[in-house]
Structures are given as C-alpha cells and as structure tokens.
Image (cartoon, rainbow, N blue to C red):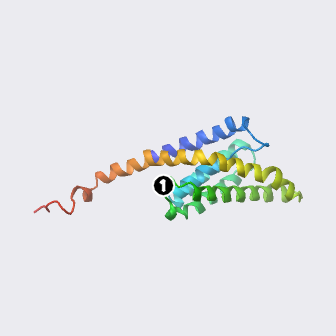
Amino acid sequence: MLAVLIFTIEIIVSYLLQNTVFAALSIANAVPDLLIIVAVAAGYQNSRLRGMSVGFFCGLILDVGSGGILGKYALFYMIIGYVSGHFNKYYVQRDIFFPLGLITVSEFALCTATYIFGFLIRGDLNLVDHVKSIFIPKILYTVVVALVYYLLLDLLYERILNRKAEDESFLAPESILTEDSPKPL
C-alpha cells in the first residue's frame, strides 16, 4: 500500500514539475520527460509488473492532460515500463550508466513513435528536421535531467520502499531463528 502511495505522489509531482517548472526552463523548445524517467526507474528497480503499471499511469496522466487521444501515451509508457522491467536482474543501486542508457533508448523510441503516429501518418515526411529540432534536444535534455532525477528516485526507493521490506522481513518467522540459535524442543 505504501508503494502505491509513493508511486502516485511521484507521478503527480513529476507531471507537475514537467509541465510547470521545466516548461518554463525549456531549452530549444524541449522539455525533459520526467515521466519516462519515472517509468524506467520503476521497471528497472522493481519489476516488469510495477514498471508496466507505473508506466501506464504516467502515460494516462499525459493523455488526460494533453486532451488528445486517450490511451496513446498510456500504451507507449506501459511498454517502456515493461521493457525496463526486463533489465531488473541487472539492477545495481546507485549505478547511473545503465539506467541512462535505458532512458535514452526509451526517449528515442517514444520520439519515433510520436513522429510515426503524429506526423508521418499525416504525410509529413521531413524526418531530418524532426530529428534535429525535436528528437536530439529532447533526448539530451531528458538525459541531463535524469542524471539528478534518477538518483533522487533511487534514493527514495532505497530509503522508503526497501526499508519497509527490511521491516517486514524482521517480523518473518525465519528471521527469528538463526542457524546458531538453539532449536525449540
């Protein structure tokens, strides 16, 4: 229950930061995608299921906020969270390089899908201009912000969610008896 509350607050705060503070600090008309960082972090640090569900709600809040087709971003972000969850077995705490690679690839895939379903279908074949003016600034800005934001999320998961797991393991019957302690009669 605590994890659901933490992820809900995290998604709402990330959405608000992305659309207020970072929208005012846009560079080359690019705003960093904090919600993709949240979806990748949830999948990479936890599991495929948690990454998929957090990604779905990240995309859903974007769909509702944009007023466009409901479910387009929810599907994209859900897939990104699910795929990131496949790399959970490689998770190392406070490692920044592998998650930055996942965030970069995920942002590129999202930009590509947005181009295909938003522009290419309507006949806009000018891919080179889209790459120069949208893809590259958005990916670079997201990766630079992810250097700090991902580490904050990692610290949050370590402090709150893992501490709860340690507290629950303390109450488990297996942890009461150790191998050195005498066995009950």
Please state the horizontal and vertical placement of residue 67, each as a whole percent of the image: 74, 43
Q: Which residue, given by chain and number where applicable, does mark 1 sit on?
A: 93
Q: Secondary structure at mark 1?
A: loop
Residue at coordinates 28% horizontally, 55% vertically from top-left? 172
- State the quadrant of the C terminus: bottom left
Please state the horizontal and vertical placement of residue 103, each as a whole percent of the image: 64, 55
Q: Is residue 48 left or right of residue 64?
A: left
Report which quarter residue 119 is drawn in: bottom right
Report which quarter residue 25 is drawn in: top right
- Dot 1 crowding, Cα within 10 Å, few <14, some 14–19, many 20+: few
Q: Nearer the viewer, residue 99 or 76?
A: 99
Please state the horizontal and vertical placement of residue 58, each as a whole percent of the image: 62, 48
Asked whether residue 173 is in view, the answer is: yes
Q: Is residue 65 above or below residue 84?
A: above
Q: Nearer the viewer, residue 156 or 147?
A: 147
Residue at coordinates 54% horizontally, 41% vertically from top-left? 9
Q: Is residue 85 left or right of residue 34?
A: left
Asked whether residue 121 is in view, the answer is: no
Please state the horizontal and vertical placement of residue 23, each as a whole percent of the image: 72, 38
Q: Nearer the viewer, residue 143 or 33?
A: 143
Residue at coordinates 64% horizontally, 51% vertically from top-left? 36
Amino acid type shown at disc 1: Gln
